[in-house]
Image: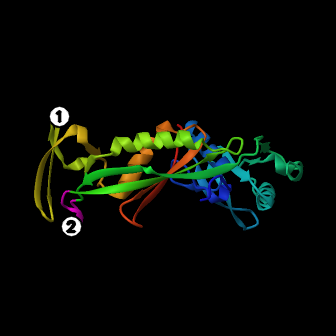
Amino acid sequence: MPSGSAILDSDFRYIDKKGNLLRSRTELSIAEMLAFLGVEYEYNYSLTLKNGNKVNVDFKTEKGLIEVIDDEKDIIKYKELKQENTDAKIIAIGHPKLAAKLKELEDIVLYKTKDVQTGSIFIEDPSFAFDYAHILPLVEKCSILHGHTSSVMVELVGEMKNNLLVDFGEAKKIIKEVISILDHKFFINRRYLTKEDDLHYNIAFDGPKGKFDLRVPKNTTYLLEGEATVENLSTEIIKLLVPKMPKNIEAVGVYVYEGYNKGAHIISQISRS
């Protein structure tokens, strides 16, 4: 993505704790509020109206229905819900830009907010590289101890302030700190750990190339919750980056390249709960 490019809500993925793919930042806020209050909800609930039409309502709770109004189609749907549905209470939440078209309707909550501009930047630098060794016992070609030099590119997405997402110098410093944690380490799945003492891990497994039984120093070994693939390394870098990110950063993406034109990209939304 170009540096500082504007992104619409439709370009960004919002996922609630139930795994539902939501359509907007407003829907995510409602889902998080309901979850915090312990209110069970069903997202994108299918409702049959008295006239036989079927419509999907954004949220159904035991107390009633919640509809988020983002455009003209939502206004039409809400009017139909009010006219043709008498069995459940319904409330709508809409943006002030729609106030003139909603003024004749009841049970409307207009949320006031500044115009939010979401942007993204990507950062890559020759210093964003690390050397490591790993073993992938489940992959025959990679089931022996071997090493790589991997380069990293990081993508940050969030709310811009004064047309700035984050200072490049600050972001670069954070990324270099995280990569230094991984540099010159031996990566291995924690499941292969058989025992440990104060200074060493014992790693053992049966693989395509035979039985491995290793005793490795703790200070140069990095245990992963999963196989030591570039996908998992991308995820691990995200885990280390997220706590260091400014509060306006909403998602972090990490590319880890394992050689020329080959690697993995993982992007994760940040949960501040």
Instruction: Name the mark on residue 227.
Output: none
**94 to the left or right of 102:** left
Q: Secondary structure at mark 2?
A: helix
Residue toward you, 173 or 271: 173
Highlighted range, magenta: 137-145
Along the polypeptide, which appears first: circle 1 or circle 2? Answer: 2
Kind of residue at badge 1: Leu
Is most of the magenta stretch helix, strand or loop?
Answer: loop
**Is residue 240 visible in this depiction of the protein?**
no
Q: Which residue is mark 2?
A: 140
- Residue at coordinates 39% horizontally, 45% vertically from top-left? 179
Q: Amino acid at mark 2?
A: Glu
> Residue 114 in the image: x percent, y percent?
76, 41
Residue 55 occupies which quadrant of the picture? bottom right
Q: Residues within 10 Å of mark 1 (few under 14, many from 20)?
A: few
Q: Which residue is mark 1?
A: 199
